[in-house]
Amino acid sequence: MAVSATRKLGGDQKCIPLKDIRLNIFRMYPKETLGTSEETIDAILNYHCINMRARFPDPLNQRKNADWMTSPLFYRCERGMYRLLTQDEVVVFKEVLNEGHDIVYRDEYTMNSLRSVFKKIRIEKI
């Protein structure tokens, strides 16, 4: 639901306010009751977002397998603003994650900094 609602708002191309994503879910799924409370929507975004502190189900073990690692879907542009990851960004993220680089475990980071690490990894492999 969150992916479809975000995409319909253009969230595959630009950052969308969280409140707009919520409202669009309510509009698109008016009869759905499971997973449509504001808290649940926020949690779903957080758990599938690659760059925010709330994605860690176990703050004491940030490397514990979680949704943001196995199903990365969202990027937090800034507080309260999200967009969908592109396929290229998913590839970049997964390679950096597979290399075990610390950037993916920071509370927050930018896509530019993730791409920079990705490029360094690629150069080192040559």
Image (cartoon, grey):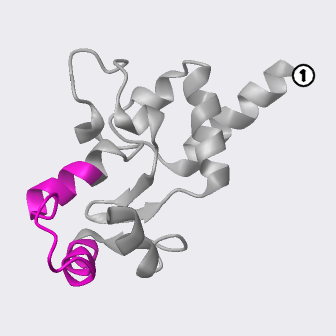
Three-letter amino acid code at the position of disc 1? Ile
Q: In front: 39, or 99?
A: 39
- Vertical relation: 10 (above or below) 2: below
Magenta-highlighted stretch: main secondary structure?
Answer: helix
Locate the N terminus and report the quarter of the image it occupies. Answer: bottom left
Name the spot of residue 31 as percent of width and height, x first. 14, 77
Q: Residue at x 73, y 29 (%)?
A: 120
Q: Is residue 51 left or right of residue 45?
A: right
Report how many numbered discs are placed on residues in the image: 1
Q: Residue at x 16, y 70 (%)?
A: 32
Q: Residue at x 35, y 73 (%)?
A: 5
Q: Is residue 93 left or right of residue 65?
A: right
- Vertical relation: 53 (above or below) 30: above
Q: Judging from the image, what secondary structure is the residue with disc 1 in?
A: loop
Residue pointed to by mark 1: 126
Name the spot of residue 38 as percent of width and height, x first. 11, 64
Q: Residue at x 27, y 81 (%)?
A: 28
Q: Is residue 100 left or right of residue 75?
A: right
Which region of the structure is painted magenta? 19-44
Q: Callout 1: 10 Å neighbours few (<14), some, many (20+)?
A: few
Q: Quadrant of residue 87?
A: bottom right
Q: Is 15 one of the magenta-colored residues?
A: no
Q: Is residue 61 left or right of residue 6?
A: left
Name the spot of residue 55 as percent of width and height, x first. 28, 38
